[in-house]
Image (spheres, rainbow, N blue to C red):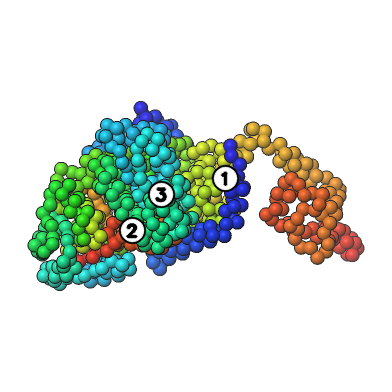
């Protein structure tokens, strides 16, 4: 009822009839400059560090593991089921809960954990962003509830920008119910424009490029 | 019909603390925006604006097509689309769903559309608790106020106001350190997130080809609202559509920069339906509520329909010399500033707040900063014309008409015109040193002249009129 009324109002106002095809839309604007990996890493670091995020470029899986181990030593962490984490050996670090497949358990653990350790499907160099695609390997809560988020990303997944992301993932719903682009730690400036980090999401973000 | 809220505006102007709060906050946002849109930082900024405008124009002109495409794709993703003609239908839908699911607690992330329809009050009236989770919105909900600014809702509140509100409403000890106030909100709201049955969000963009709702934010409250509860309801105006996910590459670059000066906000969520069978978390049910609530009224006029291109960045508020003086609460509706001045009359009818399109200096700054190139000054002029025509129809323009008729008659009678000029100058009683007149002379201190001069100065008449000088000149040259 409301559906028909609204569509009718829209068509009447626009002078269109039901089922009428629109003229072609202006082409989407996607520009992907050619940027070397070295430069992408440098740009990513500059952008994320400007937002008070931390960037570590690991030259080996062992290097990545020891960076994570040093961060979470003596604390509790929840790790996602990402193959990259398993390859590196994150699940077997002390204090790490891994292999969780049940929502309620995950939520309980994330609500109390000090760290959330995840993979990232992509990283965006221009903005220092991490792209999280929800799947059986990556849950949404691990990068959201704990006060610190540690994300590991393969260096070949470091894209230049949003344009390249939407070039490789043109229709996000084709593979996930949730694609989240994370650009730095959670922040607010709602009281007197004073910047405060970690209001609802993690107040610290560590990105490790492997 | 309401009159210009003169007393309230004077109070705002006289409040030094408030004036400096508005001025500082908007000034800072203007600077930050300028920095990240400068040619050195973003060389293709103008091209992006033109692209955003072209996409919005195309979408709005074919809106029915994109609404149906969006609906089809949301269904394909396992979600549902609910169409609502007005505020009551939105509240009814949410109440019915809450009742069916036995839901009591709703967490909400910032949404101007739900502000527009007073959703919280409607839900509270039926015993449903709806908690705002954006820090600024949460403070305002506790203070029982509406947003002061589209993106900085609690712009007018100081830490001391917040301390008082938290003490009174949350029963916590007085706390004036902003970091700790934020932690108080985090603690209180974290419990709400984890206990909530339903999460309600807005939408910055509805993506037709992907059937996705896009939400941008900095705090993480929108992610929590759309992830933790079993049900996610996104409430969005029908004008939020864009054709393709690839268009997000254009719009996201403009939105964060124009709003807060951020190249990208901290979280951009592209949400497409409930969690899939293989996914570990996320909501089990996903609804998109498409709201008309007056929007279709804006579509018919080819010029004015561009008002629907707005992506709610707030850049026009920050740069507006009127907003920066009178603040957000003196506008009649939830949308303030230049964008509020053009959409409010179109939603409510031009005669409802007929003063609004006139409350502008037409300086054009709003159009210059608008990321989707809405011609705000042009629309203000069109609305002014509508107000004048409506007044004429209602016969409310008699005094003005009479004045102009008198003026026209006088202009056509040179002798009388000169006489009137001399008499007027004499009546003003100014001496040769006076350059400006700021006060009406005793006998004329009433009516429109007094009102006009109360905020302006008028140049004093010259000691000799043009006609006198002209005659003398002709005489001197022996003509």
The one nearer the camera, B13 or B237, is B13
Mark 2 and mark 1 on one chain: yes
Badge 3 is on which residue? B169
Looking at the figure, which quarter contains the C terminus of chain B?
bottom right
Point out residue B70 in the picture as x, y percentages from the top left corner. 30, 40
Q: Nearer the viewer, residue B474 or B128?
A: B128
Task: Indicate left or right for B217 with B413 as reference.
Answer: left
Q: Is residue A89 visible?
A: yes
Tell me: residue B385, above or below residue A110.
above
Left or right of B39, for residue B394: right
* Secondary structure under the numbered disc 2 in the rendered image: helix
Which residue is painted at 67% across and 36% down in the image? B396
Co-location on one chain, circles 3 and 2: yes
Provide the residue designation for mark 2.
B183
Quarter location, residue A204: bottom left
Query: Are both tags, 1 and 3, on one chain?
Result: yes
Q: Is residue B127 left or right of residue A202?
A: right
The label on residue B356 is: 1
* Number of numbered discs overlaid on the protein picture: 3
Residue B352, horizontal then vertical, whole percent:
56, 38
Q: State which tag comes first along the sequence, 3 or 2.
A: 3
Q: Residue most toward the top?
A: A1
Q: CA distance from mark 2 to mark 1?
A: 40 Å
| Chain ID, mark 2 | B
Which of marks 3 and 1 precedes in the sequence?
3
**Residue at x 45%, y 36% (from the top left corner):** B294
> Which of the two discs, 3 and 2, sits closer to the camera?
3
Dot 2, how many residues are within 10 Å of its Cα: few (below 14), some (14-19), or many (20+)?
Answer: some
Query: CA separation, marks 3 and 2?
Result: 16 Å
């Amino acid at each position: 009822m409301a559906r028909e009324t609204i569509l009718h109002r829209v068509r009447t106002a626009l002078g269109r009839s039901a089922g009428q095809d629109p003229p072609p839309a202006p082409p989407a604007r996607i520009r992907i400059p050619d940027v070397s990996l070295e430069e992408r890493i440098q740009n990513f670091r500059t952008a994320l560090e400007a937002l008070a995020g931390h960037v570590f470029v690991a030259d080996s899986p062992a290097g990545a593991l020891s960076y994570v181990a040093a961060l979470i030593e003596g604390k509790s962490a929840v790790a996602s089921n990402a193959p990259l984490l398993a390859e590196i050996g994150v699940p077997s670090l002390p204090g790490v809960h891994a292999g969780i497949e049940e929502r309620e358990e995950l939520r309980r653990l994330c609500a109390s954990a000090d760290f959330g350790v995840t993979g990232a499907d992509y990283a965006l160099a221009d903005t220092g962003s991490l792209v999280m695609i929800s799947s059986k390997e990556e849950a949404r809560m691990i990068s959201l509830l704990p006060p610190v988020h540690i994300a590991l990303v393969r260096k070949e997944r470091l894209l230049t920008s949003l344009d390249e992301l939407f070039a490789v993932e043109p229709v996000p719903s084709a593979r996930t119910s949730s694609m989240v682009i994370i650009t730095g730690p959670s922040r607010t400036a709602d009281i007197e424009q004073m910047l405060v980090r970690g209001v609802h999401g993690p107040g610290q973000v560590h990105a490790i490029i492997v | 019909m309401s009159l210009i809220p003169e007393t309230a505006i004077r109070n705002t102007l006289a409040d030094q603390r408030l004036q400096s709060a508005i001025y500082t906050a908007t000034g800072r946002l203007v600077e930050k925006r300028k920095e990240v849109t400068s040619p050195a930082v973003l060389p293709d900024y103008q091209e992006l604006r033109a692209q955003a405008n072209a996409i919005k124009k195309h979408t709005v002109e074919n809106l029915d097509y994109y609404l149906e495409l969006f609906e089809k794709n949301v269904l394909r993703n396992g979600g549902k689309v609910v169409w609502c003609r007005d505020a009551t239908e939105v509240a009814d839908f949410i109440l019915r769903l809450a009742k069916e699911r036995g839901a009591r607690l709703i967490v909400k992330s910032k949404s101007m559309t739900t502000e527009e329809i007073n959703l919280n009050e409607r839900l509270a009236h039926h015993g449903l608790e709806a908690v705002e989770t954006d820090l600024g919105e949460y403070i305002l909900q506790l203070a029982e106020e509406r947003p002061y600014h589209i993106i900085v809702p609690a712009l007018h509140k100081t830490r001391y106001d917040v301390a008082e509100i938290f003490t009174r409403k949350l029963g916590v000890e007085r706390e004036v350190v902003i970091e700790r106030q934020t932690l108080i909100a985090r603690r209180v709201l974290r419990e709400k997130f984890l206990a909530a049955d339903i999460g309600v969000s807005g939408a910055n963009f509805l993506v037709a080809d992907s059937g996705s709702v896009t939400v941008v934010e900095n705090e993480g409250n929108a992610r929590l609202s759309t992830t933790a509860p079993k049900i996610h309801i996104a409430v969005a105006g029908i004008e939020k559509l864009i054709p393709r996910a690839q268009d997000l590459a254009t719009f996201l670059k403009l939105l964060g920069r124009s709003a807060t000066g951020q190249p990208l906000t901290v979280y951009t969520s592209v949400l497409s339906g409930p969690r899939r069978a293989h996914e570990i978390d996320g909501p089990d049910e996903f609804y998109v509520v498409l709201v008309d609530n007056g929007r279709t009224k804006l579509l018919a006029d080819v010029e004015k329909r561009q008002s629907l291109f707005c992506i709610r960045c707030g850049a026009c508020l920050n740069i507006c010399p009127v907003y920066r003086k009178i603040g957000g609460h003196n506008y009649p509706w939830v949308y303030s500033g230049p964008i509020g001045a053009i959409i409010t009359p179109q939603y409510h009818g031009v005669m409802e707040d007929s003063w609004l399109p006139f409350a502008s200096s037409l300086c054009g700054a709003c159009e210059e900063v608008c990321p989707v190139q809405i011609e705000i000054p042009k629309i203000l002029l069109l609305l002014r014309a509508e107000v004048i025509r409506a007044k004429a129809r209602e016969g409310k323009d008699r005094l003005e008409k009479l004045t102009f008729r008198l003026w026209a008659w006088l202009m056509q009678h040179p002798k009388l015109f000169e006489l009137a000029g001399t008499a007027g100058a004499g009546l003003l009683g100014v001496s040769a040193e006076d350059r400006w007149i700021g006060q009406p002379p005793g006998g004329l201190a009433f009516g429109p002249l007094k009102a006009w001069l109360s905020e302006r100065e008028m140049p004093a008449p010259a000691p000799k009129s043009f006609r006198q000088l002209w005659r003398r000149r002709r005489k001197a040259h022996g003509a």
